[in-house]
Amino acid sequence: MDSTTAESELDLPQSLVVLICNALNGGARPFILAICGWADTGKSTLAARVCSALDRLGVQAASISTDDFMLERAKRNALGISGYDTRSLDVQDLRDALAMFAEGKPFGVHRYDNRTGTRSPTSEVVTAAEVLVVEGIHSLHAAIASQSDLKVFIDSDEDTLRQLRYRANILKRGMTPVDAVARISNEWNDYSVFVRPRIESADLVVRVDLEFKYRCVRGAT
């Protein structure tokens, strides 16, 4: 993909699989794909589809979320910070996990539950694989961006992003419409300050719509 693909609709999972396989064929093993963007833009679904497609090709792949390294909601609320604030992330633990993956070693994660805002007390072991997909709002954090081989940012206009979040707050998190709107208002400024500027570090920028169709804005070679 290059600048000639700007604003063209694309099969994003398949496009990413092609880029990853080309890199693997060139000797880039293990490989880390980072998928960043505003919440509820399809990052976790995209990560799962990429992993499934790679598995069908015989490529071992695993995925984690930066949410798995985030302070629980009650603690964030007590500190008066949102999940978009970089202070909500245990950067060192995430860096260590990525370093272990790069060395071909397994590592543990405590999976985050978006409905309860808590992390599992039980550590889940992520085994060594050829590809690791790291999805989440902090996956392009400045402290870890250099550890990724391909960096993707999912973007859109503000109205679309707010609508996606509103819909998910009600359907996924069980919020009332009033609470759903209030949550977005509190988060948007932090997103604009801490997360969206990381778009400049992305290799591939795509625009998502309300039906989760993607269009390429800036391509990766």
Image (cartoon, rainbow, N blue to C red):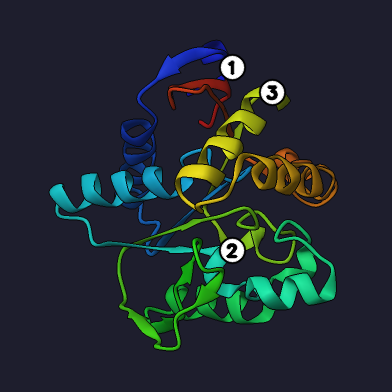
Q: Marks 3 and 2: which is nearer the front?
A: 3
Say few, some or many: other residues with alpha carbon within 10 Å of mark 1 (under 14 / 14 to 19 / 20 or more).
few
Labels 1 and 2: the sequence-earlier one: 1
- State the residue position of label 3: 159
Tag 3 and tag 2, C-beta contact below 8 Å: no
Q: Is residue 184 left or right of residue 124?
A: right
Q: CA distance from mark 1 to mark 2?
A: 25 Å
The type of residue carrying mark 2 is Gln
Say few, some or many: other residues with alpha carbon within 10 Å of mark 2 (under 14 / 14 to 19 / 20 or more).
some
Q: CA distance from mark 3 to mark 2?
A: 32 Å
- State the residue position of label 2: 147
The type of residue carrying mark 3 is Asp
Q: Which mark is residue 3?
A: 1
Labels 3 and 2: the sequence-earlier one: 2
Q: Residue at x 61, y 75 (%)?
A: 95
Q: CA distance from mark 1 to mark 3?
A: 26 Å
Q: Residue at x 65, y 60 (%)?
A: 146
When the figure is inspected, residue 4 is found, relative to residue 164, above or below; the finding is above
Measured as percent of width and height from the top left, residue 61 is found at: 29, 60
Q: Residue at x 18, y 53 (%)?
A: 55
